Amino acid sequence: MKETDMGINMGLTDAQREAMAKAVTAVLADTYALYFKTHVYHWNVTGPRFHDLHALFETQYNELWMATDLIAERIRALDVVAPRSYAEMTEAAAIKSGGDATDANDMLRDLLKGHETVVATIRKALALASEHGDEATADVLTPRLTEHEKSAWMLRSTIG
């Protein structure tokens, strides 16, 4: 998993950096899967709430897309290679990226479940960051946690 053999002096052992990178990779993979699913629903939503949901999904998938770069850069800062294929992303993700729902409320529920899954993944990574004293990773993930909790609230409120 480690990219180089040169000494890295970040206050974390090699094992801690690799463990953190694995935890952050899980966050990246879930974020990427949720990005894709949200984009699929943006394309395919229909019905009387089309305009509002189309716009909501667009806002959310754009935010998710921007987050993937920040998260992947944290993996690289830990001196570990970020996932290089869809297969690696799929293997690391708890969320399945396909968006199979066709009813608007089912789409909302599916996305809500996705955000709740990412929240759980982030909380696990934050616990590990605390255990290892990795404040830099916590600084990247804490705003992500806030964003996913906000998105989940918005989806819950939209379902009614």
Image (spheres, rainbow, N blue to C red):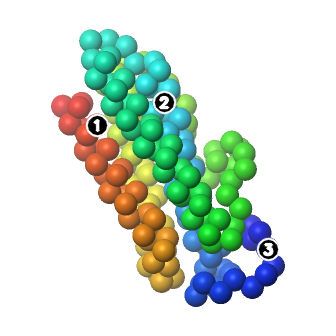
Where is residue 141? Give x, y as percent.
Answer: 44, 63
Q: CA distance from mark 2 to mark 1?
A: 15 Å
Q: Residues within 10 Å of mark 3 (few under 14, many from 20)?
A: few
Q: Quadrant of the C terminus?
A: top left
Numbered label attached to residue 4: 3
Q: Amino acid at mark 3?
A: Thr
Whether label 3 touches label 1, CB < 8 Å: no
Q: Is residue 66 above or below residue 106?
A: below
Q: Quadrant of residue 79?
A: bottom right
For the residue marked with disc 1, what is the amino acid?
Answer: Leu
Q: Secondary structure at mark 3?
A: loop
Front disc: 3 or 1: 3
- The CA span between labels 3 and 1 is 42 Å
The residue pinned by badge 1 equals 155
Q: Quadrant of residue 152?
A: top left
Q: Which residue is mark 2?
A: 39
Q: Earlier in the sequence, mark 2 or mark 1?
A: 2
Q: Answer with left or right where residue 59 lies relative to residue 150.
A: right
Q: Amino acid at mark 2?
A: His
Q: Residue at the location (63% across, 72% down)?
A: 78
Q: Quick one: SS at disc 1?
A: helix
The Cα–Cα distance between marks 2 and 3, rounded to whole angstroms, is: 36 Å
Total numbered circles: 3
The answer to whether residue 153 is above or below residue 129 is: above
Counting from the top left corner in percent of width and height, residue 63 is at: 42, 43
Residue 2 visible from this viewpoint: yes
Give the left or right position of residue 17, taking residue 116 as reference: right
- Secondary structure beneath disc 2? helix
- Is residue 118 rendered to the left or right of residue 97? left
